[in-house]
Image (tube, grey):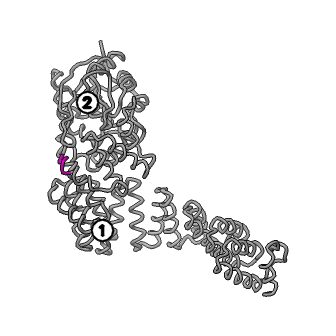
């Protein structure tokens, strides 16, 4: 057989397809020669031998050895093709199935790996390691629902598996099932108090949902477990900032810069904290030293903001282009780039609102009320009361762009017994509102489209800080005119522009002229009841001016 093998290698036109099925011994000899060829650097020739042996053999172990040889030659696609053919011959071979899993994983094909892992979990439903691996494949596909289910099954079979608990928590975070994710991370930290990954993730999630006191305790423990972790210092520093302890937070983020200057995240975090605190010049100085090519998206967004405030259009554009290189579908960056180019948009680019508020949702209340001095819900409530005699009591309320429910708190005295419906485009914001239990109904929808699907009328409709994310008011005001009761009132805020109709600003928000607002209202049968100048909020140290408007149906 060795003589035959040598003859085979000397004649490139001869293939194994001309021979009878190989014996195990004959295949082993040929594979040994292929190994020699591979070691000598003749990868293509060796790969052809491996492929021919695999196609000629009826022995599973020989086929696997040939597949491994192909993989060693860098022929992953050919190896997968052979494995798929072998599985048609041996569909119930666990060894063959798992080799197909490994081959698909190594080529970055998690969907292929998941397909085979589903089969192996059907064959061995009580083996937690297969369920865990299936969960990893789904996570790589970003199919978080299936990933969570697979990790949950892993834990049903192996409740003490810390890795599966952490990974299930990760999937639950992606599904925005935050309370359940906290349970997963907390289970690991109770079993293993020094588990660095679970402790850090628990602290970050508690911070994200606004439970700052416990988050601070957990993140301090994360630093105790790993005093040199720059990431843990950044996490605690950011949490302290959002809890109103910015100076202490800055100290920790600056320490992160010293602990690991190479990661750059510490410097980005310091810049972000300074920017959000309105300390623009300090933020600009810190962020100027950040390498744009290595910055993360949060840092890049902060760099865009300081470049915009400095009216450095070139730097702002380069920063947004870098974000789009990292994520071509990033809705916020695409919209801001359009704003920077002064494109004549009538509506925000898809994904902009979701990106902005998905990032801010869990810290929104603290940021708006404490950092930005946001008082518009209270001011709107006062304006509504002022134009009514006696003080009104509403029975059916619709809150467009309801966010986390700040408007509901401000209107408590006017809504006793009322049906309360909130509408928002951000699922993350709705989750926060849902936790407060202040609405009868919550709807995840664009405001204009939600109005079209509504039934009946409302005697109060509000839209605090919605118009800056709308642009053209024609469709929105038309829907409001249909849904407003005869004696109802529509209260809203908007940023103003001195002339014209509406304008997309570099901030990405739309500003409207009072004349345009009145004209848009009149065109659909609404009339202005009140229009009061107001300072809507303070953002990155700048005052945002605008109006509180009240409309009703024209009689």
Q: At which x and y percent is residue 445?
A: 40, 37
Identify the image quadrant of residue 202: bottom left
Q: Which residue is drawn at 42% across and 39% down?
A: 350
Figure label count = 2
Q: At which x and y percent is residue 184?
A: 36, 65
In the depicted structure, whether residue 392 falls above or below residue 73: above
The N terminus lies in which quarter of the figure? bottom right
Residue 250 visible in the displayed image: yes
Q: Which of marks 1 and 2 is in front?
A: 2
In the depicted structure, whether residue 419 falls above or below residue 435: above
Alpha-carbon span between mark 1 and mark 2 = 43 Å
Query: Horizontally, is 367 left or right of 17 in the view?
Result: left
Label 1: which secondary element: helix
Residue under numbered circle 1: 199
Residue under numbered circle 2: 495
Query: Horizontally, is 380 left or right of 331 in the view?
Result: left
The dominant secondary structure in magenta is helix
| Marks 1 and 2 in Cβ contact (< 8 Å) | no
Residue 427 visible in the displayed image: no
Identify the image quadrant of residue 338: top left
Q: How crowded is mark 1: few (under 14 residues within 10 Å), some or many (20 or more)?
A: many
Q: Residue at x 54, y 63 (%)?
A: 108
**Label 1 vs 2, first from the N-terminus:** 1
């Amino acid at each position: 057989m060795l003589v035959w093998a040598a003859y085979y290698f000397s004649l490139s036109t001869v293939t194994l397809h001309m021979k009878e099925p190989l014996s195990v011994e004959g295949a082993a000899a040929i594979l040994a020669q292929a190994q020699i060829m591979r070691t000598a650097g003749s990868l293509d020739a060796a790969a052809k031998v491996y492929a021919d042996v695999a196609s000629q053999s009826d022995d599973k172990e020989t086929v696997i050895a040939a597949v491994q040889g192909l993989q060693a030659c860098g022929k992953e696609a050919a190896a997968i093709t052979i494995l798929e053919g072998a599985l048609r011959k041996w569909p119930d071979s666990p060894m063959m199935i798992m080799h197909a899993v490994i081959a698909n994983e190594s080529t970055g094909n998690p969907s292929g790996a998941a397909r085979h892992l589903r089969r192996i979990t059907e064959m061995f439903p009580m083996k937690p390691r297969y369920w865990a691996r299936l969960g990893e494949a789904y996570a790589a596909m970003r199919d978080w629902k299936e990933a969570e289910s697979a990790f949950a099954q892993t834990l049903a079979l192996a409740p003490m598996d810390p890795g599966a608990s952490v990974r299930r928590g990760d999937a639950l975070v992606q599904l925005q099932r935050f309370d359940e994710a906290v349970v997963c991370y907390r289970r690991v930290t109770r079993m293993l108090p020094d588990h660095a990954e679970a402790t850090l993730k628990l602290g970050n999630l508690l911070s994200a949902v606004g439970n700052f006191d416990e988050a601070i305790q957990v993140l301090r423990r994360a630093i105790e477990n790993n005093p040199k972790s720059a990431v843990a210092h950044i996490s605690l520093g950011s949490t302290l900032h959002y809890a109103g302890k910015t100076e202490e937070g800055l100290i920790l983020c600056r320490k992160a810069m010293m602990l690991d200057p190479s990661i750059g995240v510490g410097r980005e975090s310091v810049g972000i904290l300074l920017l959000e605190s309105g300390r623009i010049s300090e933020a600009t100085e810190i962020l100027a030293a950040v390498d744009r090519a290595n910055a993360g998206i949060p840092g890049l967004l902060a760099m865009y903001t300081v470049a915009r405030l400095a009216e450095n259009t070139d730097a702002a554009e380069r920063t947004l282009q870098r974000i789009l290189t990292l994520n071509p579908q990033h809705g916020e960056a695409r919209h801001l780039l359009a704003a920077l180019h002064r494109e004549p948009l009538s509506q925000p680019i898809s994904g902009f609102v979701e990106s902005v508020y998905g990032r801010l949702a869990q810290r929104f209340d603290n940021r708006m009320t404490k950092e930005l001095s946001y008082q518009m819900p209270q001011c709107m409530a006062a304006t509504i009361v002022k134009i009514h005699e006696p003080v009104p009591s509403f029975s059916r309320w619709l809150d467009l762009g309801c966010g986390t429910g700040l408007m509901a708190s401000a209107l408590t005295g006017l809504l006793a017994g009322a049906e309360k419906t909130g509408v928002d485009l951000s699922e993350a914001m709705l989750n926060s509102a849902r936790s407060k239990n202040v609405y009868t109904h919550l709807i995840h929808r664009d405001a204009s489209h939600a109005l079209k699907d509504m039934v009946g009328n409302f005697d109060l409709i509000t839209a605090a800080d919605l118009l800056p994310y709308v642009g053209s008011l024609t469709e929105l005001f038309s829907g409001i005119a249909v849904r407003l009761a005869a004696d109802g009132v529509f209260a809203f805020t908007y940023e103003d522009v001195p002339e014209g109709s509406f304008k997309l600003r570099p901030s990405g928000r739309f500003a409207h002229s009072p004349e345009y607002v009145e004209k848009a209202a009149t065109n659909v049968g609404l009339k202005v009841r009140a229009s009061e100048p107001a300072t809507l909020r303070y953002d990155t140290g700048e005052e945002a001016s605008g109006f509180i408007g009240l409309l009703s149906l024209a009689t």
